[in-house]
Amino acid sequence: MPEPSRPWPGYREIPPRLNIADEVLEGPAVAGRGDRAAMLWRGGSISYRELRGKVHGFARGLKELGVSPGDPVLVQMPNSVEFATAFLAGVKLGALPVVVNSLLGVREVRAILEQTAPRLAVAEGSRAEVLRGLRGPAGVRTLVCAGTSRSDEVPFESLIHEPSDTIATTDTSAHEPAFMVCTSGTTGRPKCIVHAHRWIVALGDLNRYRLPPEPRDVVMATGEWSFISALGHNLLFPLRNGVACAVLSGRATPENVLEHVADLGVTLLHSVATVYRRMLATEGMEDAYDIHTLRGAHSTGEALREATYRQWKSRFGCEMYEHYGVSEYQLVVGQGARHPVKPGSVGVPAPDVGIDIVDDDGRGVPAGSVGRTVISADDPGLFLEYHGDPGRTEAARRGGVYDTGDLAYRDQEGYFFIAGRSDDCFKTRGLFLVPTEVENALQRRPAVAEAVVVPEPDPEIGNRVLAVVVPAAGHDPSAELAEALRDSLREELAHYKVPYRIEFAETIPKSPVGKILRSAVASGRERRSP
């Protein structure tokens, strides 16, 4: 199903001079959207004109505190108008906002501070204890806090001068650093990933292409904006498209998410498969809330599974789209309104995206063959560097491509299917096994809510196949259930793919963005046997 190489004039064309703050704030103002809601939350809203004024005022305040182009500025806040104001003000000045999760602990934050060396940080007062403990001559010197009354901190509100158009946006190249997202460092040294201003066009146009915005759209994500998927889909892309960004307050429980959808009139919801499965686990959840405004639900972070998709469509009615991305890019490939959804697939790449599937020698693989997912180093959406780590950056861009570390295959129609991380796949009895194939089969069983497949070392066959299952409501873990599941799998899977043992767990451990922590599963800490 070929598409034109350029869906509209100027698609993904990067101007030489570009600043993200102007792209998302000045464009809507020029287009006459100043009085429309830019952000909504329970109990309030802010218009594009008002948000633009706050950003201008806060940028002036930061400048008076000595923030200059190129300076890293740590932003550690929950989703809020204050986050949007601080982030965009820093970008407007040509500084480098470093966004980190608001709930990170001392070890993670210290490691990020050591790598990025910001002298000023912006935080929410009630969540600033970690930063307060890390202040000092070698660390953060100035702490700007929302809601603070401490004499050694700068109140966030005091920095917002009267709205002024006299604060000019720093003239930035499209290819120079704009912001940085940092991993939590759960697997070692944090990755501090630097993105350029061009990212807003390269990825923003993919967002517009995949699901063209509608004037009435209200977009909400359940993740923190410290994660690039939520930063783009929930904040920057809606603002650039001139539609409303909805802010989720509180935890992403099924009840709280659906209450926000109903109260704020959300039309596009971005979340992870775990949240959708929790919604489906409660009988009648689809009838308990008025969510008629919802025209699309989006899932990322972990495999959605065909069974989850079909249950959602059957019970909630609206379309569900899955997409695949990495922090070094954001959205790599995703389902959207231009192509029929193929359950289990993550969709068809948008035009002009430098994605390919290759073998270990870098050669493209034919349809149906599993290979490594790579992104062209020339794609304007790809990150610039790992801050302060040139060796890691060079290794990541070797051979003119960025190797995502994910295995995938595509079918004859061009749809992509993610097979899992290259280090998640393993051999058993000398044969290559892709865990997601077995996991998908398990989750098609009504008795299974979630499933993960991991290797268990065996001296004779290399690895045995072990499945850990979270039972669906109404199904108790037992040896009989485990054997019944294995028997049913034998009807559709090759014998070597059928788990030799199925164990049960109440939950499957996941990262803050919803990715399964397979190492924790394999260690057995979260499991219990029937």
Image (cartoon, rainbow, N blue to C red):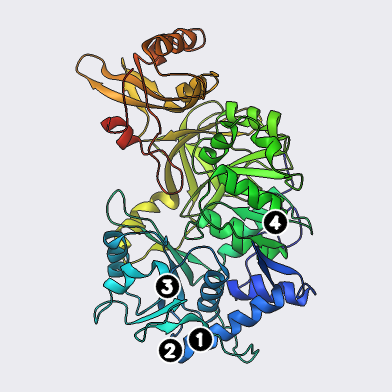
Answer with the quarter of the image where residue 183 lies: bottom left
Q: Which residue is mark 1?
A: 159
In the orientation shown, which residue stands out farthest toward the left? 459
Q: Earlier in the sequence, mark 4 or mark 1?
A: 1
In this rendering, the label closer to the viewer, 4 or 2: 4
Tell me residue 304's x, y (percent): 55, 34
* Residue shown at the point (40%, 18%) measured from the top left: 477
Residue 507 visible from this viewpoint: yes
- Residue 443 x/y as whole percent: 51, 23
Give left or right: position of 318 versus 173: right
In terms of depth relative to the viewer, which is nearer, 117 or 404? 117
Task: State yes or no: discs 4 and 3 in contact (Cβ < 8 Å).
Answer: no
Between disc 3 and disc 1, the foreground one is 3
Q: Amino acid at mark 4?
A: Leu
Q: Which residue is mark 2?
A: 65
| 454 on left or right of 358 | left
Question: Which residue is tagged 4?
Answer: 264
x, y percentage for residue 61?
50, 88
